[in-house]
Image: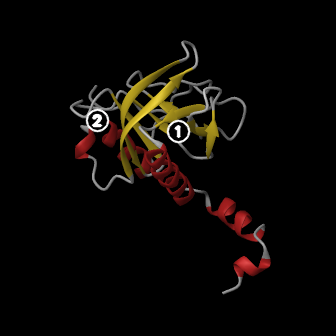
């Protein structure tokens, strides 16, 4: 089709050109939300055609079934991480909607610093990524946190604000 089919964008949903999420939430619905339309449009573009990305570069994703790291060229934009097989790809091979995910730095068994994307609930998959070095990992962690935070629902942002210590909330 050239662009992703229209899928329900639940927190942690993975996007693919099959038109279904790759996790347990596999229901399709018509989309009418501008953000979803923009995200689908972006996935049909080459990586360098996405305007004003929040972060871009190579990331290695841990494939838990093979315990191997798979390299992707990644673009982070508006709470969505797009995956490309290379910088020369004509469209995204997939992506991940990051709403509700928590970003942490973790040390795996081989003592390498990795980026952990922890889902909002157990029904979704935890993802592990690794950049070329610790500095790049930190750059991605900062960008991922900012991108996710930007798209928090208003009620969640208010709740987070109310839970902060009083000295942090004074103007």
Element under disc 1: loop
Q: Nearer the viewer, residue 65 or 24?
A: 65
Q: Nearer the viewer, residue 131 or 142?
A: 131
Percent from the top left, x then y, of residue 3?
31, 32
Disc 1 + disc 2, Cβ < 8 Å: no
- Residue found 52% across the figure and 49% down from its top: 141
Measured Cα–Cα span from mark 1 to mark 2: 17 Å
- Residue found 28% across the figure and 25% down from its top: 1
Percent from the top left, x then y, of residue 16?
42, 26
Q: Is residue 152 left or right of residue 54?
A: right
Farthest residue toward the top? Answer: 66
Q: Give the answer, above or below, for where 145 lies relative to 46.
A: below
- Residue found 41% across the figure and 21% down from its top: 18
In the rendered image, the quadrant that contains the C terminus is bottom right
| Residue identifier under label 1 | 9
The crowd level at tag 1 (other Cα within 10 Å; few <14, some 14-19, many 20+) is: many
Percent from the top left, x then y, of residue 164?
75, 69
| Residue identifier under label 2 | 44
The crowd level at tag 2 (other Cα within 10 Å; few <14, some 14-19, many 20+) is: some
């Amino acid at each position: 089709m050239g662009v992703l089919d229209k899928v329900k964008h639940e927190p942690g949903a993975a996007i693919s050109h099959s038109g279904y999420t790759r996790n347990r939430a596999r229901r399709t619905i018509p989309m009418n939300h501008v953000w979803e339309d923009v995200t689908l449009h972006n996935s049909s573009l080459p990586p360098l055609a996405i305007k004003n990305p929040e972060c871009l570069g190579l990331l290695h994703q841990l494939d838990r079934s093979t315990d191997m790291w798979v390299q992707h060229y990644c673009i982070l934009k508006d709470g969505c991480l797009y995956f490309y097989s290379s910088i020369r790809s004509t469209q995204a091979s997939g992506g991940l909607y990051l709403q509700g995910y928590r970003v942490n730095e973790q040390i795996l068994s081989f003592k390498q610093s990795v980026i952990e994307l922890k889902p909002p609930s157990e029904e979704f998959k935890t993802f592990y990524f690794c950049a070329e070095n610790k500095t790049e990992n930190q750059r991605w962690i900062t960008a991922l946190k900012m991108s996710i935070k930007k798209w928090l629902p208003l009620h969640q942002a208010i709740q987070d604000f109310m839970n902060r210590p009083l000295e942090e909330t004074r103007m």
